[in-house]
Every structure is written in C-alpha cells, then in structure tokens.
Image: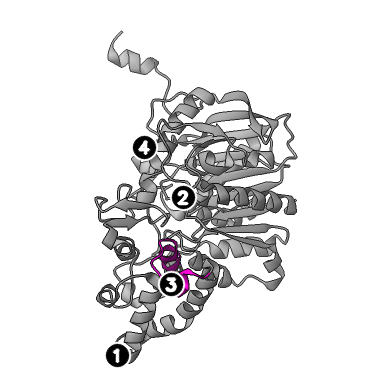
Amino acid sequence: MTDKQDNENKPPKFQEEELVCQEKQIDFRSQILRYQATTGRLPLKNKDQEIDAQIFFTYYQKTPSDKQRPLTFAFNGGPGSPAIWLHLGALGPKKVQMTAEGFFPQLPFKMVDNSHSWLNETDLVFIDPVGCGYSEAKDEKTQEKFFSPNGDIESMGEFIRLFLTRFERWSSPLFLAGESYGAFRVAGLAGHLFHRGITFNGVMLISGALNFYTLHIGPDYRLHDLPFVLILPSYTAAAWYHKKLSDDLQKRDLKDVLQEVEKWAKTEYTLALMEGNELTTENYDNIVDKLCMYTGLQPQKVREVDLRVTLQEFCHNLMKPENTVVGRLDTRFVGLNAYESVVGSLTGDPSLASIIPPFNSCFYQYVAEELGYKSDLTYQNLTGVTSWKWENGHADTSQALQKAMSLNPHMKLYVGIGYYDLATPYFAMDYTLSHMRLDASRHANIAYHAYEAGHMYYINENSLQKFYDHIAQFITGSL
C-alpha cells in the first residue's frame, strides 16, 4: 500500500471521537465515593456542520447517577492554561501530592485520593479551551476565531450547551468555576448564556481577574496609576511573610496590617500619584518612607522607579540580599537568582517552576492509566497563546456578571482570593466588586473568602480545607 493510500484509509483527524467511560471510586473521609469518569473530546461545529475544533474534557458523575444533582463546569485561565490545576489540585477525586505548604514534593511525583473533592457536593466537568490541553482547532486560520475574549466565551458557551444536550443535564442546578482568566471567562459566560436560556445557581471566582484595567502595567503606566495602588497591599503581605517589615508591623496580625495599608493606598498614595510632577519634595519624601515601610524595599529603589513599583522590580528586590527572588503567582515561593529576569515567564517564576513538573507528570500518567484516554498529543499547558487578540486594551467582564446577577435574583457569587498572589492582587478584585454598580439587594448573594496562600491557594493544605468547607456551604446555600 502506498503512503497516499495509507493516508486515505486513515480516519479524518477532525471527526467525532468515541468517549472513554470508567467506573471508579476513592476513599473520601473513611467512606467510599463512587463515580463514573468520562473523558474525551466534543466537537464544535460551524454553521455548515463542519468541525472547527475538538474540546477535551473530563466529566465526573457521582454514582448512582442523579441528573437533578448540581453540575459544575470548571476552567483555569491563562489564556493558554488547561483545567489541570483545578482538576488535579483541588476539585477532582484525585490530586497531586505536594508538601503541606504546597511546595515542590519529593520525587517520584504521585497522586492521592482527594478528601476535599467537590465531587462530594457536585458533579464536575473540567474543560480545556481551544489551544489548551488536548483541545485544538482544525487549523491556524480557524483557530483565530477562538483566540479572543469574545471568541473564547462564545465557544465555551457552545460547549456548555452541547454538553447539557448530549448528557441530558438541562434540569440540573448549574454552577461555573473559574480561576484567574478562567474567572474572567465564567463571569462573561454568566451574562452570555443567560440570553440563551442557560442560567446558573452560582458562579465561583477563584483568584480572579475581571477588569484588566486594574492590573495592566504597560508602556503608558505613568498615565495609569491605578494598578500600583491595587497591588501595594499584596506587596505588604509578601514582605510580612518573609519578615521584611519593621518589628512593630511584623508583630501584628497580617489582616490588621493590610487594613492599614489599604487605607493608606486609597488616600495618601493615590493622591500623591495623581500629583505627578507637582508633588512637593517634602510629600515625595514622605511617600518614599511609607512605601519602604510597607514593601520592605530600599529608598534608592523606590526613588529609582518614581514611587511606582512594578511587579518585576518587587519580586527581584525584596530578597536581593539573600540572592533570591520571590514568586509572582505565590510570593511564599523563593528561587535562587539564577532565575530568568522575567518573573512572569515559566522559568522565571519560582512558584510556577515548583508546580509545573509534578502536575504535568501526574496528568499524563493519570489520564492514560486511570481514565483510559490514550493520546500521543502534547498536553498544552500554560502555552501563553501569543496570538490572542484582546479586542481592546482593557478587557472587562464585570459588567456581564453584574447584568447576570441583576437578571437572576437567585444567582450566588463566591469570590476567593490569596493574600500572597501578585498575578491577580486581591485588592484589585475588591476594587472591581465595589465598582460593578451591583444593586444593594444583590450584595447578600456574595460570599467573599481570603486565604493566606497564593494564586493557587488550594495547594496549601490548610487553605484547601477551608476552601472545601466554603464551597460546600456555598453550593448548599445556592440550591
């Protein structure tokens, strides 16, 4: 047989795939939790019913099955990150074993039964958007329509509609859970899907970012000071953790210190930055002193950056005498100064470098051996989707969430933040929530929880326990 004939006899790459189903069980707090795991890819089709993309997912359904049981769709962020972190870090029936603090574990890496799995409270669907995990578009041209905030929300909304139809879950109480950019995604989905007849009992925002105007520090930063104000309390939390503050601040409770810093950031610091070059020398010196007191940085560095400390400057200078850098996703993590200069890169962030190897290794073994899904594809994890089209400079889905909560009086909102997270600083989320113009009658629908950990606060065992308790209460209260 010729190569041409051989290729013609192979099934097309983009045809419907057969899903893999496995009956499984775990030890959940001294009881047996039984479930069915369904793994595979569902097709997204265009108006001509041609497959444009294959979306990889893992579906856990507690057995015996009950289609009236809550169902949660879960996403990670990026954009460019599959759902591996929520899947194997907190929500799924199995999790990667890290240290109790969430640091790099002893080799060989292994997985254990998850005694905090959400499966005890809700069925789960972990979804990898196009360009993440095993999900892929038909070709590069087709891929373009998925690589934008609107394209992403529309495609994930179509996946949810298709899933509810294929698995007959339209009558289930529905939830959305998203971490980081995944929170941006699910906030947008809540508004997008409402007008398509799909409403949610609750939305969970995990270390979320809804309005990028609160985060983005770009070339125009001197005309946009808000991100410097909103990240400052997170700098203080990091300095407090590493004992870089003055003795009187170190002796105080972290939350107490942060309340002081938040107040100063919203008043004196904000006013000083607004003054620009009109700020007097005396006031400038006072602000330098306060910034040094609240960040643990040296006056020379604060003056060098003109009172505006970027994330990278902070991470590389907080522990410079020790020749170490602190993490962006989790400032509890430190790495030798051999790390690359860009803290946000895969190799430049010690908090990323400590979790990628165990999660990647465990996933490949788990999906093939435990779930029975075989693939020679590379599982695309944190690829960074460089061709992403942002559509405007400061993307925002907070108003889509506000509209969904306004239209659906029963929808609840969980917000979880980590104090040691510089990627999505908690004060930025506070600012976004307070500026959503959400009617006062909906404020009681919001559950807000803070954890003394980083972006993936659930990798810390103490935070994971609290996280599970909060979510179990949230789901029960949303039914």
Of the two numbered discs 2 and 4 in the rendering, the one whose residue sits closer to the viewer: 2
Q: Percent x, y for residue 297?
A: 33, 70
Coloring basis for residues: one colour
Mark 4 or mark 3: name the one nearer the start of the chain: 4
| Region in magenta | 234-252
Of the two numbered discs 2 and 1 in the rendering, the one whose residue sits closer to the viewer: 1
Mark 2 lies on a secondary structure that is loop
Give the CA distance from mark 2 to mark 1: 43 Å
The total number of labels drawn is: 4
Residue at image coords 71%, 29%: 63
Numbered tag placed on residue 247 in the rendering:
3
Mark 3 or mark 2: name the one nearer the start of the chain: 2
* Amino acid, disc 3: Asp
* Amino acid, disc 1: Thr
Mark 1 or mark 3: name the one nearer the start of the chain: 3
Mark 1 or mark 4: name the one nearer the start of the chain: 4
Give the CA distance from mark 3 to mark 2: 38 Å
- Mark 3: give few (<14), some (14-19) or many (20+) Cα within 10 Å: few
**Does 19 sit above or below residue 401?**
above
Residue at image coords 27%, 51%: 339
Task: Confirm whether residue 199 shows in the render.
Answer: no
* Amino acid, disc 2: Gly
- Front-most of residues 12 and 444: 444
Mark 3 lies on a secondary structure that is helix
Numbered tag placed on residue 281 in the rendering:
1
Numbered tag placed on residue 77 in the rendering:
2
Residue at image coords 41%, 42%: 104
Give the CA distance from mark 4 to mark 3: 58 Å
Q: Kindly identify which residue carries mark 4.
A: 139
In the image: residue 73, left or right of residue 263: right
